[in-house]
Amino acid sequence: MNKSVRTTLIGAAAMLISGAAVIPVAAFAAMPANPCSAHKTMSMTHKRVAASAHVKAIQEALNKAGATLKVDGMMGKGTHAALKEFQSKHGLKATGYANKATLKALDVK
């Protein structure tokens, strides 16, 4: 990833984290058309930064199923690993991501 793309992404992430309501269109102009395929590591890191009530619900459900996660709403390495373990134990495809089948098995809406 070149420096200008990295700088633009860092700026956009900072605005999101600070609660800025508007993100300039220029912030996305330098991004590749499909960042997930071109920069898989970047997209995984970006997903892990997002904190939400939904992730907290997933973490709580994983803890009820035997995991020992800190319920912080962050989709970090521990949550990812716990999801993979849960999926493996329940006959689901072990991706480490909360797809529809995993959410149903966890009883998370």
Image: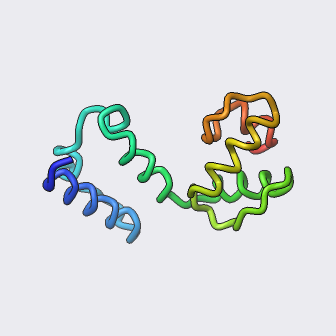
Instruction: Return the residue nearer the eye: 62 or 84.
Output: 84
Image vertical order of residue 57 relative to residue 83, above or below: below
Residue drawn at x 61%, y 49% as measured from the top left: 80
**Percent position of residue 9, x then y:** 26, 55
Direction from residue 40 to residue 28 in the image, left or right: left
For the image shown, how many numbered marks are present on the structure? 0
Way the structure is coloured: rainbow
Residue closest to the far bottom: 18
Q: Quadrant of residue 64?
A: bottom right
Residue drawn at x 78%, y 62% as measured from the top left: 68
Direction from residue 11 to residue 60 in the image, left or right: right
**Percent position of residue 96, x then y:** 62, 41
Residue drawn at x 79%, y 42% as measured from the top left: 106
Residue drawn at x 72%, y 56% as measured from the top left: 59
Q: Quadrant of residue 92?
A: top right
**Percent position of residue 73, x then y:** 62, 62
Dividing the image into 4 quarters, which one contains the C terminus? top right
**Percent position of residue 103, x then y:** 73, 39
Instruction: Return the residue nearer the eye: 19 or 98.
Output: 98
Instruction: Return the residue nearer the eye: 52 or 7.
Output: 7
